[in-house]
Amino acid sequence: MLWRVTIQRDDPNKPKGFSPQQQQAQGGDAVFWLNQDSNTTHQPVSTDTGAKWSVPPITGGNSSTQLDLDVPGVVNYKCALHDDETGSIVIANAVPIANGAEPLFPSTSISAGQSVSWSNSDSCAHEPTPDSGNAWFTAPIESGDISACVAFGTAGSFPYHCKLHPDNANEKGTITVA
């Protein structure tokens, strides 16, 4: 999926800097920045020590090249030309809820500190929920939607099921955190 972040400083009626300031994506997605200023150039660059990247300067009214988001985690960035403009992208491990898949909720292994989000391409809504503990979501993931990110900070095994279809054995999975 391709995501868009806008940038602007000139219009006092719009948020200054990057919008949204925190973008959510899944591994394999891409993002581009749209400069909504007419006379100001912006340049998103990584502020993380491990993943260095920069996008070429974006002149007023233009879009950036696409940045591929391959590695799950949090990508922090700023404008190389305006230190007060910052943003981040939470890249989650993608768990597909695919129409006709068996099991419908696949088990997934991640590293501690990473996030998971579910993309629902099934024809009906689903709501992954842990077998124990607090619910991950307050509403179902509708067909065609992507869930919010769920962060897993500690190692362990986290079995889950569909809250909407609790008796369907095909709608169970496990997140294993190493």
Image (cartoon, helix red, strand yellow):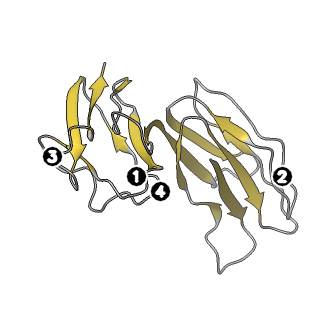
Q: Earlier in the sequence, mark 3 or mark 2?
A: 2
The quadrant in which residue 141 appears is bottom left
Q: Which residue has dot 3 on it?
A: 167
Image quarter (top left, top right, bottom left or bottom right) of the C terminus: top left
Q: CA distance from mark 4 to mark 1?
A: 10 Å
Which of the two discs, 4 and 1, sits closer to the camera? 4
As shown in the figure, which amino acid type bears the numbered disc 3? Asp
166 sits left or right of 72 in the view: left
| Residue at 61 percent of width and 70 percent of height | 15
Distance, label 1 to label 2, CA atoms, is: 29 Å
Figure quadrant of residue 110? top left
Residue named by callout 2? 58
Residue drawn at (21%, 52%) of the image: 165
Between circles 3 and 4, the one closer to the viewer is: 3
Query: Mark 4 or mark 2: which comes first in sequence?
Result: 2
Three-letter amino acid code of the residue under disc 2? Ile
Residue type marked 4 = Asp
